[in-house]
Image (tube, grey):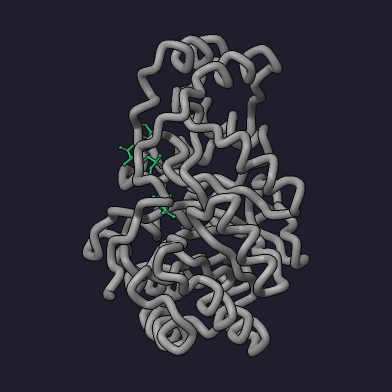
Amino acid sequence: MAFRSETSAVPPIVLNDGNVIPQLGFGVFQVPAEDVFSVVTTALEVGYRSIDTAAVYGNEEGVGRAIRESGLPRDEIYITTKLWNSEQGYDSTLRAFDASMDRLGVDYLDLYLIHWPVAAAGRFVDTFRAFQTLKSQGRVKSIGVSNFTVENLRQLMAETGEIPVVNQIELHPRLAQRELREFQDANAISTEAWSPLGQGTLLDDGTITAVAAEVQRTAAQVIIRWHLQRGTIVIPKSVTPARIAENFDVFGFELTAEQMAAIDTLDTGARIGPDPEAFTIGLID
Ligand code: NAD
């Protein structure tokens, strides 16, 4: 087997609960269930040790099988999954967690996230209380959120007395999320970027390709470096083995302060995904 087990070049990020997440992981949004086993197997062979899935992606089973069949020790792999909107609420969250764990086939989870706040439903506090129960039982090591606004984070912390370890948000050079980022830094909430490559739409941007030419790397590698050098946790996705490897090969070069600043100018605030304040898909009532 080609699985590498040497000390990884991926920097560890220490979360506010003391647990450690690899700064670079692998996302599997839109990876079809029938393909996910081979895609995750490739990612593990390349050296990724953190996999980001979600109940709603419909591919937790294949992710879990790839992890189990890799033969790598469970504690060398970091697994994140997310609770879908329709399952928010205390009891329904406990049931949804059991279902995700059955599909993943592992005996503990590293990180459980509330996928979207769906603030209008008024359930994310009860949902997070269920997360706290699961954490106290040792079934999940760390608990966090995704797509939360500053207002959502403030409410969650005030009403549960707990600071989520991460907020996983849409973040890329066109949407640098400055205000949310500052709030999270001030509150010891780690920032994790989803769609870090802008789902591929940033790869032909002239500023990015100019920096790529300067450092003799690809546009994807330049964007991933930009995230890493800003201290962001980053989870790019690809189903193509060469690109999966390319996106992991980002530790042999650095961007200068000038190159970072040039990429910073691309921030227009333009989203690719939904606005978290308006997103209620999956809400059942
Ligand atoms: P991404 O920014 O990682 O872009 C992925 C796409 O970029 C690929 O499908 C491919 O088209 C292209 N690409 C990737 N590497 C490339 C390369 N080296 N060269 C050329 N093209 C390349 O987008 P994403 O998948 O939306 O986001 C990454 C992960 O974030 C997801 O897989 C998922 O795990 C997570 N995510 C979370 C949420 C959330 O609401 N929490 C939402 C979206 C995504």
- Quadrant where the C terminus sits is bottom left
- Name which residue lies at 42% across and 51% down: 277
- Asked if residue 211 is positioned above or below residue 97 in the image, the reply reads above
As drawn, 248 above or below 30: above
Instruction: Say how many tags the image has.
Output: 0
Residue 106 pos. (x, y %): 48, 81
- Quadrant of residue 153 in the image? bottom right
Residue found 40% across the figure and 79% down from its top: 100
| Left/right of residue 149 with respect to residue 246 in the rendered view | right
Q: Residue at x 55, y 32 (%)?
A: 176
Q: Quadrant of ligand 1?
A: top left
Residue in view at x 66 percent, y 55 percent: 6
- Pick the front one: 20 or 149: 149
**Percent position (x, y) of residue 67?**
45, 69
* Residue 231 place in picture, x, y as percent: 68, 40
Q: Name the side, left or right, on which 186 lies relative to 284.
A: right
